[in-house]
Image (tube, rainbow, N blue to C red):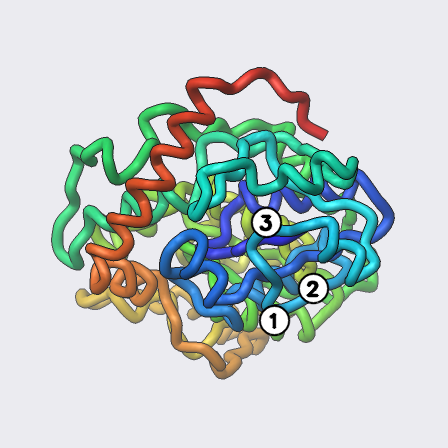
Amino acid sequence: MAACMDLIHSGHFNCMRQAKKLGDILVIGVISDDEIRRCKGPPVMNQEERRIMAEACKWADEVIDGVEYYVTPEILERVGYDYVIYGDDLAIRKDTGTDAYADVRAAGKLKIIKRTEGISTTDMVGKMLLMTSNELVTSPPTQISASTKTQFLSTTRRINQFSTPKTPAPTDRIVYIDGAFDLLHRGHVETIKRAREFGDYLIVGVHDDRTVNSIKGLNYPIMNLHERTLNLLALKYVDDVIMGAPWEITEDMIKTLNIQVVVQGTNHKDSMMTTPHEDPYTVPKRLGIYQEISSTCNLNAEDIVDRIVAHRLQYTKRNERMTANQQQYYENKQFVPEI
């Protein structure tokens, strides 16, 4: 499966989940920066950032870095793989306007899976194109985003599909980390991975939309609580997620969940609060179970938004073409069962 993995979201992860069910080994090919520029437009995240996200996915068995955008039978033969996976939305070549997978389709090497509707990189970029650091635009023009065509549908079935059926053993050392985890990125993944190393079972608390909004302002979060929860559940380092986790960690919560370690990165979640406030980690610090780890990546959601806003013209042009493709899919779509 060749994928951009740009601005990772639950649609990407659901694609990988379905793809894994179609074979024994799932290989994710992360498309190179140059190929994305040539065939789609400028990527938001660089190749290393995108590769790290692919490697963190619990359904990926192997990751290959820097692959071609369009997969051909010759490429499959060269790497020794049996099939290529793609969604039921037709991939249109930018250069010819034709089916990008016509050759592998004709060779019987293409397996189709259900596209996850209601969320796409195009829609996310469209939303951020309308943002500045201090204001929220509420009436998006149709040429930037096709989000009005469909909506993200939160279901318990999807959460169950993403969840790991694992409960902590009595002897397991349970670790807890919390945050907004908006626009899941390399910095989040690296901190979560290191937090997992403190114990045997990692619980991630994700704050609800209202809490994140009150801390970061009207523009945030970009992704809603259910979208952020699914992203976290798709990571191989995460065992469980608390949806709408409390901002302050209480002693009752620690006892209820049998938490032995509470972890925070050096990029503190309350760093954007300008008014006096109680340290949300007062209790775990008093109990001696608080651990702080150095954040090895300073990337945050605001930086990602800035990348898009700083190159507004390029991303607007890219989104106009991608939105047209999405609209064509919605106009012609038929029911495809999900795997």
Question: Mark 3 or mark 2, which has the lower sequence index?
Answer: 2
How many numbered marks appear? 3
Residue under pointer 1: 195
CA neighbours of label 2 inside 10 A, class few (<14), some (14 to 19), many (20+): some
Q: Which mark is residue 63?
A: 2
Q: Between marks 3 and 2, how big is the CA–CA gap?
A: 25 Å
Q: Earlier in the sequence, mark 3 or mark 1?
A: 1
Q: Residue at x 39, y 64 (%)?
A: 280
Kindly report the distance in space between the C-alpha atoms of the residues bearing marks 3 and 1. 14 Å
Residue 23: x and y in percent read 83, 44
Q: Residue furthest right?
A: 24
The answer to whether marks 3 and 1 mark residues whose Cβ atoms lie closer than 8 Å is: no
At label 3, which amino acid type do we have? Val
Q: Residue at x 50, y 53 (%)?
A: 8
Q: Label 3: which residue?
A: 241
| Image vertical order of residue 326 relative to residue 71, above or below | above
Name the secondary structure under disc 3: strand
